[in-house]
Image: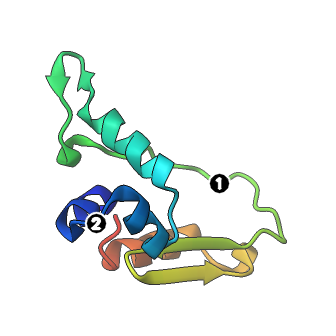
Amino acid sequence: MVLEALESSGASAAAFAREHGLCAQRILWWRRRLAEPAGGKQVEGNEVSFAPVLVRHRAPSSAVTVRVASVEISVSDPTVTEPSWVAELVTALGGG
């Protein structure tokens, strides 16, 4: 989604990263990574997936912030917020 937004914006990676509070080097890394052949074939954006994560221990004082496009979701106390709820919210906002 981020790379698609970058491409459709017409902005440079550095300008796009600044505007969205992202790291330009990370965006460029992902662009290169997705352009590399994987097992002899080109990787398309739709073929990328994320592995499920199981949270075994939650640090009580660790705040979590997720940014989806122009929306920033901050969870100040993850011990009282279910990760599945945050994942559903991110998906509903078009980030998953």
In the image, residue 10 lies at what x, y percent? 21, 66
89 in relation to 44, above or below: below
- Residue at image position (61%, 73%) is 65
- Residue at image position (48%, 48%) is 26
Question: Amino acid type of disc 2?
Answer: Ala
Question: Amino acid type of disc 1?
Answer: Val
- 41 on left or right of 64: left
Using a 10 Å C-alpha cutoff, classify the residue at mark 1 as few (fewer than 14 neighbours), some (14 to 19) or many (20 or more): few
Here the colouring is rainbow
In the image, residue 31 lies at what x, y percent? 32, 43
In the image, residue 78 lies at what x, y percent? 70, 74
- Residue at image position (28%, 66%) is 11
Question: For this rendering, which residue is in front, 64 or 42?
Answer: 42
- 30 on left or right of 8: right
- 55 on left or right of 57: left
Name which of mark 2 and mark 1 comes first in the sequence. 2
Quadrant of the image for the N terminus?
bottom left
Q: Do the residues labelled 2 and 1 touch (CB within 8 Å)?
A: no
Q: What element carries label 1?
A: loop
84 in relation to 23, above or below: below
65 in relation to 22, above or below: below
44 in relation to 11, above or below: above
Question: For this rendering, which residue is in front, 30 or 24?
Answer: 24
- Which dot marks residue 27? none
Question: For this rendering, which residue is in front, 77 or 25?
Answer: 25
Kindly identify which residue carries mark 2: 11
Using a 10 Å C-alpha cutoff, classify the residue at mark 2 as few (fewer than 14 neighbours), some (14 to 19) or many (20 or more): few
In the image, residue 73 lies at what x, y percent? 54, 81
- Residue at image position (42%, 78%) is 89
Q: What element carries label 2?
A: loop
**Separation of disc 2 and disc 1 at Cα?**
36 Å
- Which dot marks residue 55? 1
